Image (tube, rainbow, N blue to C red):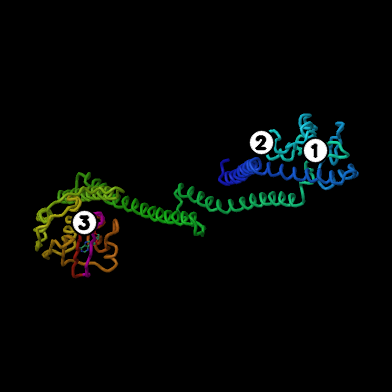
Amino acid sequence: MKSLYGKFLVLTVGIMLASAIVAFLSVNTYYHRYLKGENDAKNVQVAEQIALFIEANDGMDLPTYFNMLASTGYKLLVKSPAGDATVYGEAFRDDNLEDEAIEKVYSGEVYHGMRDLKAETFVTGYFSNESANTIGVPFIYDGKTYALFLRPDIKMLFTEIHYLLGGMVIVMAIISILAMLVVARKLIAPIVVLTKATKKVGEEQFTSELSIDRRDEIGQLAKSFQQMIDRLSENDQIRKAFVSDVSHDFQSPLLNIKGYADLLSDEELPANERIRYAGIIQSETERLSTLTKQLLLLTSLDQLISPLQKKAFRVDQQVKETVLKFQWLLQEKEMSIMLEIDEVTYEGDPAFLEKVWENLLSNALKYSPDGEAIDIRLTEQANEVCFSIEDTGIGMSFETKNRIFDRFYRADDSRTREVEGTGLGLSIVEQVVRLHDGRVEVVSELGKGTTFIVYLPKL
Ligand code: ADP
């Protein structure tokens, strides 16, 4: 059986059959242990009463009396003193009463054929229609000893109530199987829906809306599955947008390089033009190189397992070294830096955190006009380290501020101003800080300046 539905069906019928067998065996054991003896005793009592009645009414019409008894639900076998046998009621299927048993009864003993019938395994032994399966008692009639063997008539044993009970069991079995089939179909229906949805997800179709509205475990599974589809669909869109952004950002410098390289191949090109074109090719190559490095960095930050290699290090020293790296640019733009730095030892990944300071400082420089000043502060508080960098540059609009951490996002004026950039710097900053369980805050006003504040919690 491959389908769940088939398994359900087989299991239900199997359980019913198994329980019927177990019930039959238990009833059987109970019959052999307790009921068989009781039944024997009851019938001995009946037989003895009959014998007593005959003896008390000597001379009565025996065949009429026995026929009357047979009509009340007994089978009788009467052995006359001469050894002739007469059966009253329906004939025995098997006449296997042993002579020894008959002799015993003639001699005054009671024959317990019902109790002592060969250890039949099943309760069906009780119904076995044989003369050995009887109770035997002697009685005296007309001064002679007779032997009377009797047992209840099977047909009489089955009364209407037995047929009713049997019918009830059969109807119950049929109803249970039918109900099980309906319930199984209802239970399995959402699994079929889920299976179809899983197949669609496997084919990268993330559009399906599951129409399963249940509160049980399957409902919860469907809910989690729907959430997973939504997440996958979101990720898929982000991935597609990312790939298109990456290709666009690679494509434009490559086109520039190709175009200027073509122009350079003109031998009659004046020297100053050649120098200009070579300069453009160089800056576009640098841009591509930065882009590749940043993408590699972001990919390593995207790993499921944290790529951080933490160790205790002096953040103040690292910030000072970063400022030194930008010294040439500071001089070129005639800008000054105010440093207010506490001595801070922090346990984090120095290589990644260095990228944070670098990106924030390079942005402050990029987005400030020449001659402005930048304030950098580093302080240690009770449970966090706080780094802030404030510039008096172009600032950001509210919309820009909300999007600066998106990958490849660059404010329109940053693009038009021809400021070098990839739109990945702040994504890297945000992700590194998040991996350190910290947060980045931005205060900015268009035309007035921007302050980035990084909070890093101490372990
Ligand atoms: P980019 O390579 O363009 O600098 P970033 O991710 O570092 O990319 O920054 C995203 C955008 O955020 C920038 O294009 C710019 O518009 C804005 N931005 C970042 N820092 C500043 C700042 N100090 N002042 C004004 N705008 C900024």
The answer as to whether callout 3 falls within 8 Å of ligand 1 is yes
Residue 313: horizontal and vertical position, in percent?
13, 51
Ligand 1 shows up in the quarter that is bottom left
Q: Nearer the viewer, residue 260 or 183?
A: 183
Residue 148, given in percent of the width and then of the height, sits at: 81, 38
Circle 3 SS class: loop
Left/right placement of residue 249 relative to residue 50 reads: left
Bounds of the magenta span? Answer: 431-446
Q: Is residue 13 visible?
A: no
Q: Which residue is mark 3?
A: 420
Categorize mark 1 by other alpha carbons within 10 Å: few (<14), some (14-19), many (20+): many
* Percent coordinates x, y for residue 239 in the rendering: 36, 52
Nearer the N terminus, badge 2 or badge 1?
2
Mark seen at residue 191? none
Q: Which residue is mark 2?
A: 121
**Badge 2 amino acid:** Thr
